[in-house]
Image (cartoon, helix red, strand yellow):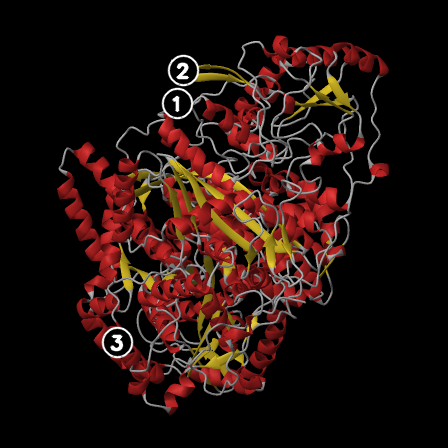
């Protein structure tokens, strides 16, 4: 007799069309509480196979490992014990949940009644309910904070009371004060706003049900992707709609500038953190303890953004580890039995801040958050921003992730309240988990038809025949699905209709003129050369924002395609070492699970083989005859990054003589690229993006060609010209790639 | 090793009144010992007094253990839980307070908690099958040498099997359903220190392996014979070395032979007006030597060291969680009259309805106070004041007595469980105060989760209690049992779960063991616990003391 698993202990209240109240009593011998343990192990999707990724891939994988493995044995060995990431073997057959539109019901019934509905969220089983103020005083009185206060008092010769006072202020600045009234206010206004802005807000309902079970079982950490300010409003709105506990959210302190909104957000459960507080021990202690207290008590799910800030390029940013390591600590110290990490992918058909981002990337500063600014933004209310897709991923059990990884806890020999720098093992583990979560976000990120259109369009500028665009888009759709991309094609629309509706939604970016699709270049004809370049760059960057959503799905096969193009021979080892070089250079640009270069390579080769673009033998990799279209498309997709990086490296190689700061670097390189564009000696507009510029600089830093030094208020960089030149040569394939770079791996 | 030598135990002496009071309580549990030992006068040189050939001194446990004790379960032959013809649970025999009583709610509890059913019964083999027992392989020259020493010995199969195991679950399971691969080849009964010296000398001369045997209550696989041991294994049974050699009243120390079992030690000390204050659950059977070997001593030092201090500490504490409270309740005997039954109902009503305690959330602390009347009353009041402050309730002496009774009879319960597909075990740890709650919660949850993952069909009993307190931490005892119907290899599953539970304990900052010892069962984690250096130090001690590994039971290292 199999233990009956009770579906979920409390029925979800919302969906009216869903019948069949799951009942608690069906539990049988295992109580419902235990039944929910199974949440950590998905019944639907076989994630169990993840661990030994690659096992089932059979032949392709094994021959790879034989040849390329030899070259990379050393690199692979060191990382062997790491859990490999989650490349799914049967990408196309991957089963994903269905979506439901939550706005549909909002459009049919009263928002006011919705805002005033009976709201009794399910809670964590071990919860002792408490008020925000009780949490604050618990934090202040905690041994952890008191210890730091005493230490600081001793070091600075101040009385502990003064420092205690300071801690109280920090806590007040930071703390949330969730109140149901504010929540209801938001529920009402957001209903109104969202209905005007968006056509649909689609959610995978099963994900919400899994989340509901998880919340009762263990403390939950929500990890959404971050593309817009709408993210956290939407997520709270969603949880309210499904009668789940509202999360407490770590938000940047910039919001506090917005007087009323800041306060309202606070009452809706946001807590604020300073952007950087590495040096301030008191701040760190108070903040960490605040987060941990909420987590331990199971007061509410904790929500924060692994990416740290909104991604201006719609490309997932490399993760930040600080908050993640804070929320993991209670588990390491066994103050909780387990913690669930829930990756959430939020994707926008049209991003609210799209043009703001483009300006910002081109160096027109971002306006400071202010309430009046928000009011001015009202005009966007008349605009249409399409559909939002929110995919709530499978809750991942931290305990399961840690099993076998973290052996004997270093925390056992020291009192638990002493602040302790995490050991190297733990830091590495935190980093792996962060990347794993981001890869899960990417995996479940919905891609709209427009994303495909944008990717095709960018390769066919300045104008593209409409029919050809449709044909190419359809072709790309197939390829994306082969690579495991999650495409939501609205209501099985025919390709033409889908493209037309995408174009109309994004008419500010591109439009149909005389049977041709062109980028919207309003005001480009007149004006000075500089003006034209800027306008054109703006249009391209906005368009690129959408293509970018494909990149992390395509990066592994595409880098193989690029490597095939760059290496003169087809020898597997050479292709692999070129791949490794590219992967290394772009490791700040795209998301790679740390230390598994070989696996990434195999994954890329596997996918290319799957779409008949390449053939592999023991020693060699060949492009097939019909594969050339795919391969050249893939390398063209990443061409802007290759060229952009080359431009930026060339600037650093030639134009910088002495140490500089980031503030000097960005305008410098921007001018450099700008001039080249004006002269027409390059077409790489994307090199104007400050995001790419920063990433390229960071790449040189971790490749060792640029030295980064900490100074009082930031960092300075000094360039090793010769090393940069070497790297440039590798791009031009004048030097065999593996020697200097691969040797260091 | 320690068990083979005479152990000198500190006997915390105190006013005779306190010792007597303590003894009364103990004897309350052990009413009617089977035989009254004839005491010989204390003498510093017992070997001379008795002479090698004189009849063995009589303790509570005879040489032929099987005459008094179960061969395949815990404790006395005549004491066990059964379901009588009416299907009611009953405890047989007259040794314990519970003896002869009906336990009306027990059946329901065992059905509800484990999903066990009286219809599904396993049957242990009725008696030892001599043909299964590995043959005794003993070198003839050694036998001749041994005969010359006049030390009593036996190669009888039953005697040897009885000394091949402790009381771990898997060992009992083997007795019921299979046979050990390796057992001692010969059992010897030294009666004094010199006898032990002779035996060890002979073992060195013939290169044999010695495994000391005291009370046989080990729960760390310490008595298991290493399968790969090719030499003759001698089981050195210390049970006949059970005298107090001297008591130094000025310094409050005593010299006692290693084989004396707990109940005899207390009895004999009491005759001189002393007690040790050492009262493990197994005190009827476990021996002083075993206590020393597993470092069980000093368990109650915080009471029996400093009782004069004005400290508000009960002599003993049992703080149990809700699952164990319900369990204890299931062991409540049938009441004598309608009137008491009416009173019980009234009490239940008062507690659950009037005071608002939920029987599914309740937990209980049993406290034992010792001292003269004045002090006891004073302590009692202090404790009750604290309890009231935190919303507690004094449950009275009767409930407390039941709590203590449980500790002695609980070991018998496992044998009943085994008859109905329920296997279980207890294990312990010590842990700093600030981690006690986290550890209890996590270990219990881990057990439940592991059971589920390994296909256990019914949620297990996973419960804990705090049994000893120290200034720096507490000893936590876990009981863990589950219904194994539908599992093909229950012992393996059980061991995996117990192992996971121990890993959880260690990850939560608990110790490898509080007093059960490491033995073979937990030596896997020794390196983690005491580091390579620690292990190296132990190894070099062993290397120096016993270079030929005569004491080759392979424990600890």
Q: Which corner quadrant holds the N terminus of chain A?
A: bottom right
Q: Residue under label 2, please give it.
A: B249
Mark 1 sits on what residue? B13
- B24 or A83: nearer the viewer: B24
Looking at the image, residue B73 sits to the left or right of residue B328; the answer is right
Spatial CA span between label 2 and label 3: 93 Å
The reply to whether label 1 and label 3 mark residues of one chain is no
- Residue A7 locus on image (x, y percent): 54, 73
Q: Which residue is mark 3?
A: A377
Mark 2 surroundings: few (<14), some (14-19) or many (≥20) residues within 10 A: few
Q: Chain of mark 2?
A: B
In the image: residue A73, left or right of residue A297? right
Q: Secondary structure at mark 2?
A: loop
Q: Residue furthest bottom?
A: A108
Q: Residue at x 44, y 22 (%)?
A: B11
> What subunit carries mark 1?
B
The alpha-carbon separation of the residues under discs 1 and 3 comes to 86 Å
| Labels 2 and 1 within one chain | yes
Secondary structure under the numbered disc 3 in the rendered image = helix
Visible in this render: residue A329? no
Do the CB atoms of the residues marked 2 and 1 lie less than 8 Å apart? yes
The picture quadrant where one finds residue A635 is: bottom right
Question: Residue B481: x, y in percent?
Answer: 59, 52
């Amino acid at each position: 007799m199999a233990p009956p698993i009770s579906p979920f202990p409390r029925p979800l209240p919302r969906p009216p069309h869903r019948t069949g109240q799951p009942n608690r009593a069906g539990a049988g011998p295992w109580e419902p509480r235990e039944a929910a343990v199974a949440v950590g192990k998905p019944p639907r999707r076989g994630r169990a196979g993840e661990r030994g990724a690659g096992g089932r891939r059979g032949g392709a994988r094994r021959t790879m490992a034989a040849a390329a493995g030899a070259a990379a044995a050393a690199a692979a060995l060191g990382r062997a014990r790491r859990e490999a990431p989650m490349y799914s073997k049967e990408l196309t057959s991957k089963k994903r949940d269905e979506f439901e539109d939550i706005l549909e019901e909002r459009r049919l019934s009263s928002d006011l009644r919705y805002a005033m509905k009976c709201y009794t969220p399910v809670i964590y089983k071990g919860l002792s309910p408490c008020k925000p103020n009780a949490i604050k005083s618990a934090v202040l009185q905690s041994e952890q904070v008191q210890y730091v206060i005493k230490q600081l008092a001793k070091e600075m010769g101040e009385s502990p009371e003064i420092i205690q006072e300071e801690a109280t202020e920090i806590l007040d600045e930071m703390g949330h004060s969730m109140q149901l009234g504010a929540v209801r206010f938001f529920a009402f206004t957001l209903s109104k706003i969202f209905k005007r802005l968006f056509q649909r807000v689609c959610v995978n309902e099963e994900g919400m049900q899994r989340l509901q079970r998880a919340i009762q079982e263990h403390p939950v950490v929500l990890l959404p992707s971050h593309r817009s300010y709408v993210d956290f409003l939407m997520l709270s709105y969603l949880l309210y709609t499904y009668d789940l506990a509202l999360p407490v959210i770590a938000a940047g302190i910039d919001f506090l500038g917005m007087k009323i909104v800041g306060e309202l957000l606070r009452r809706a459960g946001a807590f604020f953190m300073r952007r950087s507080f590495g040096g301030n021990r008191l701040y760190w202690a108070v903040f960490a303890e605040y987060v941990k207290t909420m987590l331990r008590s199971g007061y509410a799910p904790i929500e924060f953004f692994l990416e740290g800030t909104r991604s201006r390029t719609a490309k997932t940013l490399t993760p930040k580890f600080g908050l993640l390591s804070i929320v993991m600590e209670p588990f390491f110290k066994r103050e909780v039995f387990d913690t669930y990490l829930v990756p959430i992918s939020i994707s926008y058909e049209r991003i609210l801040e799209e043009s703001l981002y483009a300006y910002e990337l081109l160096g027109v500063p971002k306006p400071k958050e202010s309430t009046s600014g928000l009011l001015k933004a009202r005009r966007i209310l008349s605009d249409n921003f399409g559909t939002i897709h929110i995919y709530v991923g499978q809750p991942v059990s931290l305990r399961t992730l840690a099993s076998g990884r973290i052996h004997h806890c270093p925390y056992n020999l020291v009192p638990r309240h002493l602040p302790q720098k995490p050991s190297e093992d733990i830091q590495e583990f935190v980093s792996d988990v962060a990347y794993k979560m981001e890869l899960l976000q990417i995996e479940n990120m919905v891609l709209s038809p427009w994303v495909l259109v944008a990717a095709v369009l960018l390769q066919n500028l300045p104008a593209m025949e409409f029919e050809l665009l449709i044909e190419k888009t359809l072709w790309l759709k197939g390829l994306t699905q082969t690579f495991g991309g999650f495409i939501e094609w609205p209501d099985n629309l025919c390709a033409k209709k889908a493209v037309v509706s995408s174009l109309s939604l994004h008419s500010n970016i591109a439009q149909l003129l005389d049977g041709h699709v062109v980028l919207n270049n309003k005001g480009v004809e007149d004006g000075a050369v500089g003006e034209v370049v800027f306008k054109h760059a703006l249009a391209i960057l906005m368009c690129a924002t959408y293509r970018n959503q494909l990149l992390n799905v395509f990066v592994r096969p595409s880098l193989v395609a690029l490597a095939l193009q760059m290496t003169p021979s087809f020898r597997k080892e050479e292709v692999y070492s070129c791949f490794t070089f590219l992967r290394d250079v772009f490791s700040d640009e795209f998301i790679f699970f740390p230390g598994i270069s070989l696996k990434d390579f195999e994954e890329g080769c596997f996918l290319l083989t799957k779409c008949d673009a390449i053939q592999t033998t023991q020693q060699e990799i060949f492009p097939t005859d019909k594969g050339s279209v795919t391969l050249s498309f893939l390398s063209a997709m990443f061409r802007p990054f290759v060229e952009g990086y080359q431009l930026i490296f060339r600037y650093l190689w030639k134009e910088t003589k002495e140490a500089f700061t980031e503030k000097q670097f960005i305008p410098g390189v921007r001018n450099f690229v700008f001039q080249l564009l004006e002269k027409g000696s390059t077409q790489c507009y994307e090199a104007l993006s400050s995001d790419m510029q920063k990433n390229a600089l960071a790449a040189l830093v971790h490749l060792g060609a640029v030295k980064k030094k900490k100074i009082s208020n930031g960092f300075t960089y000094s360039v090793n010209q010769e090393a940069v030149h070497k790297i440039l040569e590798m791009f031009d394939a004048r030097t065999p790639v593996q020697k200097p770079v691969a040797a260091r791996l | 090793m320690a068990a083979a030598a005479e152990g000198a135990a500190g006997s915390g002496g105190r006013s005779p009144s306190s010792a007597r009071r303590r003894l009364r309580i103990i004897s309350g549990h052990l009413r009617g010992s089977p035989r009254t030992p004839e005491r010989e006068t204390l003498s510093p040189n017992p070997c001379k007094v008795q002479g090698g050939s004189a009849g063995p001194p009589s303790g509570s446990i005879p040489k032929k253990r099987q005459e008094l004790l179960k061969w395949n379960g815990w404790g006395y032959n005549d004491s066990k839980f059964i379901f009588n013809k009416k299907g009611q649970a009953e405890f047989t025999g007259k040794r314990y307070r519970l003896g002869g009583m009906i336990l009306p709610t027990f059946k329901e509890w065992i059905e509800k908690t484990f999903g066990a059913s009286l219809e599904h019964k396993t049957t242990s083999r009725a008696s030892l099958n001599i043909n299964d027992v590995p043959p005794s392989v003993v070198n003839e020259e050694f036998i001749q040498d041994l005969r010359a020493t006049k030390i009593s010995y036996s190669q009888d199969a039953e005697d040897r099997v009885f000394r091949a195991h402790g009381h771990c679950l898997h060992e009992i399971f083997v007795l019921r359903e299979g046979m050990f691969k390796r057992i001692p080849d010969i059992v010897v009964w030294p009666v004094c220190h010199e006898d032990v010296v002779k035996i060890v000398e002979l073992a060195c001369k013939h290169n044999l392996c010695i495994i000391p045997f005291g009370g046989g209550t080990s729960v760390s696989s310490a008595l298991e014979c290493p399968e790969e041991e090719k030499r003759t294994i001698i089981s050195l049974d210390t049970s006949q070395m059970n005298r107090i050699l001297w008591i130094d009243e000025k310094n409050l120390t005593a010299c006692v032979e290693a084989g004396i079992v707990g109940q005899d030690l207390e009895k004999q000390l009491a005759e001189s007006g002393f007690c040790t204050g050492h009262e493990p659950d197994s005190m009827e059977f476990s021996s002083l030597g075993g206590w020393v070997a597993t470092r069980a001593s000093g368990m109650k030092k915080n009471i029996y060291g400093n009782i004069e201090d004005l400290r508000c500490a009960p002599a003993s504490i049992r703080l149990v969680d809700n699952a164990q409270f319900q369990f204890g309740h299931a062991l409540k005997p049938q009441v004598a009259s309608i009137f008491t039954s009416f009173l019980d109902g009234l009490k239940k009503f008062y507690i659950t309805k009037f005071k608002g305690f939920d029987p599914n959330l309740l937990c209980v602390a049993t406290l034992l106070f010792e001292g003269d009347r004045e002090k006891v009353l004073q302590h009692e009041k202090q404790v009750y004041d604290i309890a009231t402050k935190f919303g507690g309730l004094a449950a009275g002496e009767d409930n407390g007595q039941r709590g203590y009774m449980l500790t002695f009879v609980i070991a018998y319960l496992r044998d009943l469980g085994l008859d109905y597909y329920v296997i279980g075990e207890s294990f312990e740890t010590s842990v700093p105060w600030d981690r006690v709650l986290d550890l209890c919660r996590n270990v219990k949850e881990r057990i439940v989760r592991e059971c589920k993952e390994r296909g256990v069909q019914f949620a297990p009993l996973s419960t804990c209690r705090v049994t000893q307190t120290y200034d720096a931490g507490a000893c936590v005892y876990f009981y863990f049992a589950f219904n194994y119907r539908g599992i093909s290899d229950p012992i393996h599953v059980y061991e995996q779960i117990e192992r996971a539970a121990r890993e959880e304990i260690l990850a939560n900052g608990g110790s490898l063991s509080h007093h059960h010892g490491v033995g073979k069962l937990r030596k896997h984690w020794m390196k983690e616990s005491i580091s390579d250096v620690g292990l190296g130090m132990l190894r070099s001690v062993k290397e120096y003391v016993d270079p030929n590994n005569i004491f080759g039971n392979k424990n600890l290292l």
